[in-house]
Image: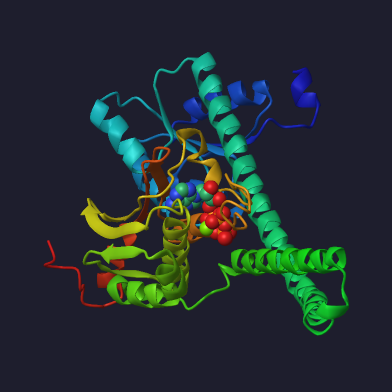
């Protein structure tokens, strides 16, 4: 009694039953517990009431005149204003098939009549608690996404604005080196060289940060991408590094996928750059690229004969600025794989590595099954059919 005097309700419950006696019992029980209760004797009343002011939860009888409980549940679940309301069926039907039908039509729980007060209260409270947690999770996720976007915009703005002054500083230092080399003593010359080297490195870092922040903006959109063509372009871009390291890169026949072409190109370029770069100077890089169809996914593999990676670093290397070597051993900024991870996530795929120190590495990534399904939805002939 004292709880009903305090006007804070534990939740708003809509009880639907065509037997007034049942409604009364349930209503009294829930009100005493501290819930605010609304009652409906028919399906149409229940639907109107739920649409007008959506309750936190609905207790729904199955055997009703005009619309039955399953039908009411389906109508509420297909309406965006009421689709999120958890529905607990409460019924004398005790068959497994009745219960299954209740879950299939969108119910979240099932209580059999004659019910026990404690059970009804426990189930209602559990569902309300779960719903509250789910709402919190959805809100946190959207806050996280927003703050991530803000961070990316910030990184983009900062890197973008830093570019120009940095270029001037490095440019003038290079001019000094070129024009006044003869006037400089050895120490000043070395200092200037350090300025130029650090400036170049900072410039590279800024460029890579910009690429990272821009991955999502690179919206050439999703379309058909022939990975064989894409790889040719990527290898052309890497020609200087390939010749310098005397690398041998072989590529098996690759599929055509639906993807964002510029993002996919960046993904291959970063993985191949690494495969060529992280090879000891006394070895020539040997790299092989292949793809196979695994269930409804394309699995891409990039094999190298490089220095390998210890299993303790398999996950960390995909984080920002994560590097396992000094700049002198292997130059880089530690952003390449973070970009790869982001690209693959934007394609609903996964990326990971298998490796052993000094036994080469294989980087894997998948492109999701939805890509193949999209072919029919977009009315595009599937060029992968018949490839086996
Ligand atoms: N194929 C590989 N073989 C061995 N180690 C690798 C390979 N690819 C990546 N790594 C390790 O993972 C780290 C992170 O790779 P990532 O591509 O993000 O950075 P990076 O190549 O050092 O710099 P960036 O790509 O930004 O120029 C590398 O520094 C290296 O230690
Ligand atoms: Mg890299």
As drawn, is 305 to the left or to the right of 164? left
Residue 131 at x, y = what percent?
57, 37
How many callouts does the rendering have?
A: 0
At a point 22% along the width and 50% down the height, the residue shown is 295
In front of the other: 136 or 81: 136
Residue 46 at x, y = what percent?
50, 46
Residue 372 at x, y = what percent?
27, 64
Q: Please say which color scheme the image uses.
A: rainbow
In front of the other: 247 or 63: 247
The single residue placed furthest to the bottom in the displayed view is 179
Q: Vertical placement of 335 versus 138: above or below? A: below
At a point 44% along the width and 72% down the height, the residue shown is 238
Q: Can residue 63 be seen in this view?
A: no
As drawn, is 31 to the left or to the right of 58? right
In the rendered view of the protein, which quadrant contains the N terminus? top right
Q: Vertical placement of 352 versus 172: above or below? A: above
Picture quadrant where residue 56 is located? top right
Q: Vertical placement of 224 versus 280: above or below? A: below
In front of the other: 159 or 329: 329
Residue 353 at x, y = what percent?
41, 45
At a point 34% along the width and 72% down the height, the residue shown is 231
Q: Vertical placement of 322 versus 292: above or below? A: above
At a point 67% along the width and 61% down the height, the residue shown is 149
In the rendered view of the protein, which quadrant contains the C terminus? bottom left
Q: Can residue 277 be seen in this view?
A: yes
């Amino acid at each position: 009694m004292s709880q009903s005097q305090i006007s804070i309700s534990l939740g708003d419950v809509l009880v639907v039953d065509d037997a007034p006696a049942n409604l009364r019992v349930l209503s009294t029980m829930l009100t005493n517990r501290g819930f605010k209760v609304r009652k409906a004797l028919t399906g149409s009343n229940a639907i109107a009431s739920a649409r007008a002011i959506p309750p936190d939860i609905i207790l729904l009888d199955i055997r009703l005149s005009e619309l039955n409980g399953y039908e009411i549940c389906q109508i509420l679940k297909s309406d965006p204003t009421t689709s999120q309301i958890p529905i607990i069926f409460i019924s004398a039907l005790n068959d497994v098939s009745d219960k299954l039908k209740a879950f299939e039509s969108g119910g979240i729980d099932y209580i059999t009549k004659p019910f026990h007060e404690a059970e009804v209260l426990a189930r209602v409270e559990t569902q309300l608690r779960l719903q509250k947690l789910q709402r919190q999770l959805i809100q946190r996720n959207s806050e996280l996404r927003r703050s991530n976007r803000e961070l990316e915009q910030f990184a983009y703005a900062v890197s973008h604005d830093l570019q120009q002054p940095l270029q001037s500083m490095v440019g003038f230092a290079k001019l000094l080196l070129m024009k006044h080399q003869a006037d400089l003593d050895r120490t000043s010359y070395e200092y200037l060289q350090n300025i130029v080297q650090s400036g170049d490195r900072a410039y590279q870092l800024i460029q890579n940060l910009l690429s990272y922040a821009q991955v999502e903006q690179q919206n050439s959109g999703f379309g058909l991408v022939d990975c064989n063509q894409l790889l040719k372009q990527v290898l052309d871009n890497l020609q200087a590094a390939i010749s310098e390291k005397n690398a041998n890169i072989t590529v098996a026949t690759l599929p055509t996928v639906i993807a964002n072409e510029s993002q996919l190109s960046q993904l291959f370029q970063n993985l191949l750059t690494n495969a060529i770069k992280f090879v000891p100077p006394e070895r020539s890089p040997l790299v092989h690229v292949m793809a196979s169809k695994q269930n409804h996914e394309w699995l891409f593999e990039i094999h190298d004969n490089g220095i390998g990676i210890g299993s303790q670093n398999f996950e960390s290397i995909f984080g920002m600025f994560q590097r396992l070597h000094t700049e002198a051993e292997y130059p880089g900024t530690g952003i390449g794989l973070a970009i790869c991870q982001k690209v693959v996530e934007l394609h609903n795929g996964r990326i990971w590595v298998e490796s052993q120190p000094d036994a080469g590495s294989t980087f894997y990534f998948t492109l999701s099954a939805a890509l193949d399904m999209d072919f029919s939805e977009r009315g595009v002939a599937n060029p992968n059919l018949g490839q086996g």
